[in-house]
Image (cartoon, rainbow, N blue to C red):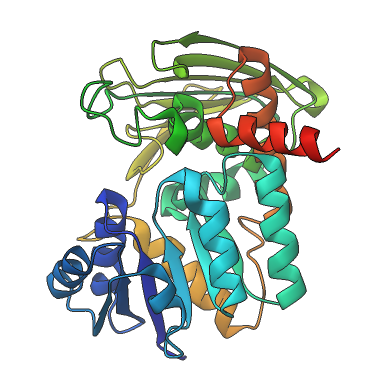
Amino acid sequence: MKRYRWGILGTGKIANRFAAALNNIAGEAEFYAAGSRNSVTGKEFAARYKAAKAYGSYEALLNDPEVDIVYIGTPGRYHHEHVLAALKAGKNVLCEKALTLNAAEAEEIIIAAREKKLFLMEAMWTRFFPVHVKIRELIAGGAIGDPRGITANFSSVAPGSLKEINRFWDLSLGASALLDLGTYGVSFASSLFGPPEQITGVAYIGEGGFDYQNSCSLRYAGGRIASIINSQVSFDVKDAVIYGTEGRIEIEAPWYKPEAMVITRSDSSSERFEFPLNGFNGYEYEIREVISRLHNGEPESSIMPLDESLQIMRTLDDLRRQWGIVFPHERNKGETDAAQG
């Protein structure tokens, strides 16, 4: 199997973890090039993870013919722009979640990828952890009967503040507990139940003009329900339960990057499944998914398909509309469209 050469756009926390994961499976994938808006930062990042090339601009990395696939780890505000640039340069793309900041942006990059016949996937790493693979197998096999609902909680105090601003607190960069944390729960429910038929939620809108915490209630076909609570101002709560007519599955925290789960059946018997990471940080699983699809000549993943990523963005859009949250670039685009109309 070809050893694909990866380029990484961005040098932040997630990009560092992704680079480390590439090094963990260096026999399967190569961290070849780092791209940063700052040449010094790019060189430091490349040296840290032994990448062959370092570029002081994203454009320079995208123009490197040796790069097979680009991982986009920049703030969500720039996903749309950077994915389009990568596709224009003829690169396959793995883009960090949330895929974009809204469904219109997601639809545009999906159309572009399909027109160019290039690989594109949202980097929803949770789906590829062995625990979640096993959960899908168990549910498909009727292990808990008919699955009726999900509860998923994700609370974690975000670094920084309105005084020490970063992507978690800057509305112009896409700050939102829903898009940063809630997208995990919405995607999780979608992977098991499909698209929601009813979308409701409440949110606390803080001084920064976005949701600091929220609660989402989603109804699916057959009366299935998902209850998803997210907060970037509350101490860690990261548990999830799937409950069915004949049992339940409890995913041990943190549920979005788990190593174990317990299934309890209606006869009170229980069984624990363990999948230790053994030195991995978890990004390796989605990297292997991408490699497998590229090797087979498939332009997208059936585990995280583009149409589902688009549907998830539509769900997130619906919730933001209910809460009155508009990102500045969306407002500016609306004003431009109105003027042109």
Nearer to me, 189 or 99? 99
Q: Residue at x 41, y 62 (%)?
A: 285
**100 shown above or below 294:** above
Nearer to me, 74 or 335? 335
**211 shown above or below 255:** above
How far from the left and from the top, in percent, is residue 268? Answer: 47, 21
**1 shown above or below 10:** below
Outermost residue on the front side: it is: 339
Residue 26 shows in this picture: yes
Q: Is residue 157 left or right of 99 when viewed as pictured?
A: left
Q: Is residue 71 left or right of 117 when viewed as pictured?
A: left
How far from the left and from the top, in percent, is residue 336? Answer: 71, 38
How far from the left and from the top, in percent, is residue 114? Answer: 74, 69
Q: Residue at x 40, y 88 (%)?
A: 3
Q: Residue at x 23, y 30 (%)?
A: 159
Q: Is residue 251 left or right of 332 when viewed as pictured?
A: left
Q: Residue at x 21, y 27 (%)?
A: 164
Q: Quadrant of the C terminus?
A: top right
* Tag count: 0
Residue 141 shows in this picture: no
Quadrant in which residue 300 is drawn: bottom right
Outermost residue on the right side: it is: 341
How far from the left and from the top, in percent, is residue 32? Answer: 31, 81
